[in-house]
Amino acid sequence: MTIRPTSAHTTTELSAPIISVRGVHKTYAGGFQALRNIDLEIRRGEIFALLGPNGAGKTTLIGIICGIVNPSSGTVVAAGHDIRKDYRAARAAIGLVPQELHTDAFESVWATVRFSRGLFGKAPNPDYLERILRALSLWDKRDAKIMSLSGGMKRRLLIAKALSHEPEILFLDEPSAGVDVELRHDMWRLVRELREQGTTIILTTHYIEEAEDMADRIGVINKGELVVVEDKTALMRKLGKKELALTLRQPLTALPAELNAWPLNLSADGQTLVYTFDSQTEETGIAELLRALNQHGIDFKDLRSSESSLEDIFVSLVQQAKGVKP
Ligand SMILES: Nc1ncnc2c1ncn2[C@@H]1O[C@H](COP(=O)(O)OP(=O)(O)OP(=O)(O)O)[C@@H](O)[C@H]1O
């Protein structure tokens, strides 16, 4: 499926960031400081996932990049245009899928996407709109009124609307919230296809496994500050921990004092011993640990290792920022 015609970019265009956020602060009218000194560059053609707990400032940041919310200070350049000085040109390069649909419930699906395209001054292109509606399984519903659509269909309509003017950049704010598993997978397939065709995608999500699955880079925002921006694989390698769980042959009531120096955790039932080690180091210490256990007559019948998920890393980053020891 080809949704968006691929356009030719020069090498300089390809290497320059498609979005550049510099020194952005936001204090809302009531005095609440929602964003502090945000610097962020989004690379052309990447999928960037913005993660953060509720109220961290994700929607505010997206609103500022899309020119909907005014920053208190700082600048945003999108597709080469300053979002405040050159709003129309910058906004035309952006498609925004908001969390909720605000459209006339009596309009049809087709009229809605055609109107959205027209808003950006684009010439009508029924073939293109048909491709989007087909890709989102909405073609059969093109004449249906919005109020007759299911929640999942309304979500897809939001995406169709955002894509109607062929934007280079697509923002998805919590696209999967309240969407069933099958539809979620369809949406992610579409997102991947759009990326393959050159669209840059920025998404916020509470489904961290989706970010783990989809994103090229991850940004974590907490209490208005960008705590980390990193390639996903590098982040998982750098901050990931590994665990080795040993199922003991005989349950223990406590660990021998000589083993206290090891980073070991005994489960409440005394059956499992968990050893945590840094996945970055060459020396895992496992061989030495197993010798030490043997010396103390601790035998095990099974052994499993696991790596921390992006979710573990996310929780520990947010806790660190709160000053809580992970
Ligand atoms: N118009 C506003 N006036 C005052 N405070 C606001 C306004 N909009 C957002 N805030 C506050 O700014 C903070 C960040 O909100 P924002 O919606 O950006 O967070 P979020 O990370 O998107 O949260 P969620 O994951 O819950 O959607 C919150 O504390 C919120 O209450």
Image (cartoon, rainbow, N blue to C red):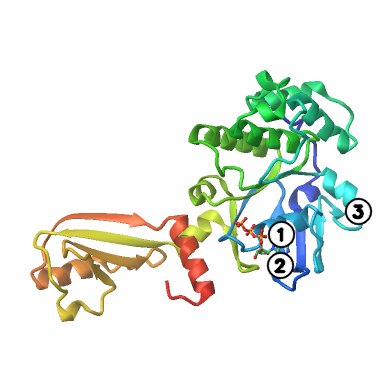
Q: Examine the rendered structure and indicate whether residue 266 appears above or below residue 18.
A: below
Mark 3 is surrounded, within 10 Å at the Cα level, by few (under 14), some (14 to 19) or many (20 or more) other residues, namely: some
Per the image, label 2 sits on a secondary structure element best described as strand
Closest to the observer, 187 or 238: 187
Q: Quadrant of ligand 1?
A: bottom right
The amino acid type, in three-letter code, at marker 2 is Ile
Identify the residue at image location x=28%, y=60%.
Answer: 244
Answer whether labels 1 and 2 touch (C-beta < 8 Å). yes
Residue pointed to by mark 2: 38
Where in the figure is residue 119, as x and y percent of width and height?
87, 37
Q: Nearer the viewer, residue 203 or 196?
A: 203
x and y, in percent, of residue 70 in the image: 82, 61
Spatial CA distance of label 3 from label 1 is 18 Å
Residue at 71 percent across and 71 percent down: it is 32
Lower sequence index among marks 3 and 1:
1
Where residue 61 is drawn, which disc sits there? 1
Q: Which residue is mark 3?
A: 86
Where the C terminus falls, by quadrant? bottom left
Helix, strand or loop at label 1? It is: helix
The x and y percentages for residue 144 are: 70, 22
Q: Amino acid at mark 3?
A: Asp
Depth check, mark 1 against mark 2: the one in front is 1
Residue 127, x across and y down, in percent: 78, 21
Asked whether the viewer can see residue 10, the reply is: yes
Quadrant hosting residue 123: top right
Residue sitting nearer the eye, 8 or 4: 4
Disc 1 within 8 angstroms of ligand 1 (CB): yes
Q: Amino acid at mark 1?
A: Leu
Say whether disc 1 or disc 2 marks the residue closer to the N-terminus: 2
Determine whether the residue tagged by mark 3 lies in a helix, strand or loop: loop
Quadrant position of the N terminus in the picture: top right
